[in-house]
Structures are given as C-alpha cells and as structure tokens.
Image (cartoon, rainbow, N blue to C red):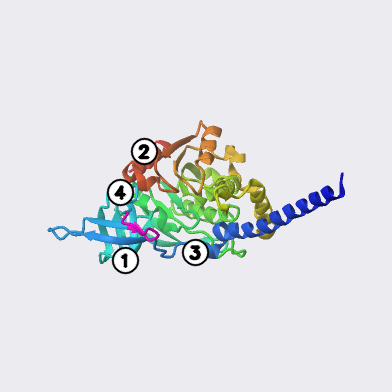
Amino acid sequence: MPRWLRRTLVWGVLLLLVFHLGGGWYFAGVIHDRALSGEARRASTDFDPDLEVVAVLDESNGDIPAIVLRPTESEGPATFYPVGTFGLRWEGGYARVGVTGTFDLVMGEPPSTGDLAQLDARAYPDIDHVMLRHGYEDVVVEGPLGAYPAWFVNGPDDTWVILVHGNSMTRLDNVRYLTALDSAGYPTLTITYRNDAGAPEDPSGLLRYGLTEWEDLEAAVRYALDHGAADVALLGDSMGGGVIAAFLQRSELASSASALVFDAPMLDFSATVDDNAAREPLVGPINLPPTLTWAAKWIADVRYDVHWDELDYLEDPSIFDVPTLVFHGEDDLTIPIATSEQLAELRPDTVELVRCPEADHTECWNVDPKGTVERVVAFLDQAVGSQA
C-alpha cells in the first residue's frame, strides 16, 4: 500500500474518532439537559409563551366565546387552533380552548390583543378548578428520601388509583382524569416523586426513568394499602410508565397492582433517544448518524451513569401480567408509538392498545376528553370492579 494512502487512511480514522468523541461528548450533554437533569426538568414547567393573541371575540351577551392565536415565529396572518381541548395560559389568566377557537375563561381576566400565551395540555390551572364530588385532601407520603406531597380524593371503592406523571410534567398533569374517577367511586392518590418541585431531590440530581423513582411509587402504594386500599390500579404517562414498570420489576408490593393504564409510556429509554436523535439536525438537512448517537449514549453512560439495558422494560414482558390499557398518540414525536405496539405484541393476553389519531405526546385526553375518560373508567370497572 502506498505511503500516502496509509497516511490518508490513518488521518481519516483519527478524524472519525475525533468527530465521534467530540460530537458524542456534546450530544451526551444534550441528553443530560433534555432528559436527565432534575433542575432542567423543574424549569421546563415554567411559563414559556410561543403564541400571540391576535383577537378575543366578544358577543352581545357579554361572554368571551372565541380567541384567535398565531405562533410568535409567524410573521403572517396565519391563525392557530389546537387539535382538541387544551388549556391556554397567559400572564394573569387561564382558559380552556378548543379546535375552532372556542374560549372558556377559567381564571383571571381575558387576554388582550398582543398578549403572549402558551398551550397547556393539563387543561386545568390547578386542582382547585377540578370538579370533585368528594373534594380533595393534601397528604404527605413518607418515602425513602423524606416527605412527598400528594393529593388524595376519597371514594367508596377499595381499589385506589395512583397517578404517576412523566418527565417535564407535574402531578397537575393527571388531574384531568380525576373528575371521572371520582364520579366512578375510585379513591385517587396523585403523587410526586424525587426531583419534583416540593419533593426531595435525588442525591445525583438526575432522573433515572424508574431505576430510583420506583421506590417513591412503592412508598405511595404502601400508603394506600395502609389507609384502606385492598389493591391499586396504576395510571402513568410518559416517564411515569417507566416508573411503574420498574416498580413491577423490583417491588415486593408489585402484586398489589391489579390494573395498569398508560399514556405514551417510556418503556425503552434507549429506543426513545434513538428515535429523537434520528430527527436531530446535525448540518443543514443532515441529521445525526446512528454511529454518533451510539457514541453519545456510550459517553452519557460514562458521564451520568445511564444504565441503558436496565431501562428497556420490554425485555421483561412478564411484569405486565395484569389487565393493561395503553393510549398512544399516532403523532407522538417524543416517545415512539412503536414501543407501545411492541408491548401489545408481546402481551396480547393482557394489553389493549388504543391509537389516538392526531395526538402528540400524552395528548390522547386532549384530542378526545370524553371518550378517553369513559374508556379508562370502563376498563377499570371491568378489570377491578367498581363498588360505586
């Protein structure tokens, strides 16, 4: 082989090595900031407007029936309406908005033209605006790191529904299910876990997608059993699904779970990172190559102790041995629907998958609020038998 060719090959290998090590280090930091940092997670719930109020339409009866919005990045007259029912928040107020621009003021004063706003999949500004027949109580769950605040809604049934939120979310995200569960008679415990605002911080400051958080869920299940629950149903979305899966794998109380409800569950963190990285721009129209994603994940393991293999809960489908209802949006760009499809294929005996057209991440309720909660209640009634 000519010397110049050997030299070219050596330099080429060195450049590839530098590219993957340097790029891998950088994108490992991106994984940390977007998916692992507890501090970034808490900050992600801050008000971050991306819509401008173009007009608020008033009618003669004095109501505020409609609103016109446009993305702040748009310079044209294009209007924006969400697909489904969402909350809309702005400085000093909150409303519920619909696909045709319908506007239902929930709190504060109506916005003015030019105000900045943000859609909110929760659809409620706080739990005080949720209609609950039995009211709610602030309770404290004592867990492995200290005291974890939770909301308890009482009911006549002896199956408690424990609601576990996801990453970049709070316990407020699941209050949209509470009215229906309350009416059906199910006591509910809407929990926090480590790295939540108001809850203890993990010593590492990092999210572990179930590998540590399952202990916090276990404490909540123990609380329910100690306070009258015969068994529990677990409802989790996004990372909350991973927390539930880890609990089923590891907890001595796993047998107390009699039913599961998921919305876009994080059941394979590695596959989710791969899916997102495949759409991550690198240069111009070129996205991250798989080899660079692999390098970033390897370096993330070294820097942040990410146990990728342990975060693939689909490797142990035996844990999903109770009736399981899974919702997943077909337009989910955060967690690929393929992971939920794989779960349904692995456990066709216990898992029912509901695909939600036009729904993005954890937005099945938003696209069809009435249909979603009715399906959840009917599923629970069949799986555990409501006593309401």
Mark-to-mark CA distance, 4 and 1: 20 Å
| Residue position for label 2 | 378
Q: Which of marks 4 and 1 is in front?
A: 1
How many C-alpha atoms fall within 10 Å of the one at disc 3: few (<14), some, or many (≥20)? some
Q: In which quarter of the image is the N terminus?
A: top right
Q: Which of marks 4 and 3 is in front?
A: 4
Return the disc, 3 or 2, that comes first in the chain's sequence.
3
Q: Can residue 94 be seen in this view?
A: yes
Instruction: Based on the picture, tell me whether residue 42 belongs to the magenta stretch.
Output: no
SS class, disc 2:
helix
Instruction: Based on the picture, tell me whether residue 73 belongs to the magenta stretch.
Output: yes
- The answer to the question of whether label 3 and label 1 lie on touching residues, with beta carbons closer than 8 A, is no
SS class, disc 4:
loop
Q: Nearer the viewer, mark 3 or mark 1?
A: 1
Residue 368: x and y in percent read: 34, 44
Q: Residue at x 27, y 65 (%)?
A: 113
Tell me where the magenta segment starts and ends, as one range: 70-78
Return the disc, 2 or 1, that comes first in the chain's sequence.
1
Q: Is residue 131 visible?
A: no
| Residue position for label 4 | 99
Q: Which of 360 and 224 is in front in this view?
A: 360
Q: Nearer the viewer, mark 3 or mark 2?
A: 3
Q: Which amino acid does label 2 sit on?
A: Ala
Q: Looking at the magenta stretch, what is its main secondary structure?
A: loop
Q: Which amino acid does label 4 sit on?
A: Val
Residue 233: x and y in percent read: 45, 45
Horizontal side, residue 122 vs residue 317: left or right: left
Q: Nearer the viewer, residue 272 or 293?
A: 293
